[in-house]
Image: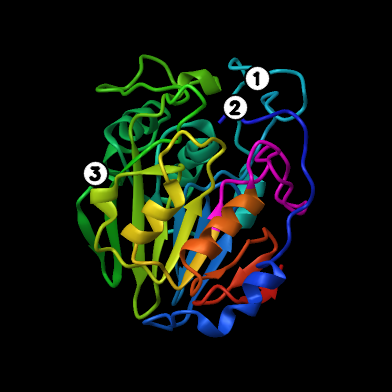
Amino acid sequence: MLRGAAIGAAAPLLSTPAAAAAETATRPSRKTGSVSFRWLGTSGWRIDAAGRTVLFDPYITRFGTGLFDGGGFKPGTRLRSDPDLVRKHVGRPEIVLVSHSHWDHIADVPHIAKSTGARVVGTETTFHLLVAFGVDPAQISVVKGGEVLDFNGITVQVVSSLHSRNERRSYFAPGTLNAPPATPPRTISDLPEGDTLAFQVTAGDGPAAFLMGASDFSEQAVQGLSPDLAMIAVPSTTATFRYVPRLLHALDRPGVVVPVHWDNFERPLSEPPRRDPDVDLDGFVAQVRQESPASRIVVPDYRTTYGTDMRAARAR
């Protein structure tokens, strides 16, 4: 959050040539299966398996808050959701996983929940915010971390996690809710972080995909997950001690590492990704390559559908 003002250069579709050269040494995925992945920008993902759809942090509408245009951050920015745009990208999801309740993770979730009937899995704060937005409480599963949920062949492991740290070793917009707010949230400042989760999703015989919504983690909580794919949030500071080495070691050096949350999340998904100028994506890739040379690194693109091993299946 609050990462910079200028708009960076467009990002590559896939891993850098040096990373691709190491591809033959990549640890193979344990599973294959007919599962596809689409990056929704920021930390968001759409996972499709046998006609079933899982969403993670689906922030589709994207709107300006002053973070990237040099005008200064505007906490009074009104929340909004574009139903037609959201429908175009999310289909008919069955499950929506929410890492935390900041606007760039949850802003479109109320509309998605109410229009599709999807089950939402998130923290108590997420529950109270969604109820205030008019979502049926019976649609929402409150979790804390440690739960393993079986959705008839789609397994969701809930992982207790942490929000990204800023230069002051604190984090943006903390706070939790233990009851719905008196009125529906209207601005981005009405959405506290509300604790942070990560998730590991395995759909049928597809790969185990570890999904992060923020660039910090609990080392103890991720030990033993050993995902095939790791969608890792790129930090904008060095406040977290040895973030990349510790995380990759705890995750048992996944076969495929996918950097996320490095893009300018106020630009539409119809454009190619643009880098957040405060995020060192190249430095992150170099660290992953150094710490886990057998991992294949895939820098994702909004327009591409990826297969089970995160190789491009087709462009949209």
* Horizontal side of residue 236 vs 127, given as left or right: right
Q: Give the range drawn in magenta.
A: 259-280
Q: What residue type is labelled 2?
A: Leu
Disc 1 crowd, CA 10 A, few/some/many (<14, 14-19, 20+): some
Can you identify the residue that label 1 sits on? 73
Is-magenta flag for residue 272? Answer: yes
* Horizontal side of residue 63 vs 232, given as left or right: right
Task: Identify the image quadrant of residue 311.
Answer: bottom right
* Residue 266: x %, y % from top left: 69, 37
* Residue 283: x %, y % from top left: 62, 51
Mark found first going from the N terminus, 3 or 1: 1
Can you identify the residue that label 3 sits on? 143
Do the numbered discs 2 and 1 sit on residues whose CB atoms are within 8 Å?
yes
* Horizontal side of residue 297 vs 56, given as left or right: right
281 lies above or below 301:
above
* Residue 62: x %, y % from top left: 65, 38
Main secondary-structure element of the magenta-colored stretch:
loop
Foreground of the two, 264 or 135: 264
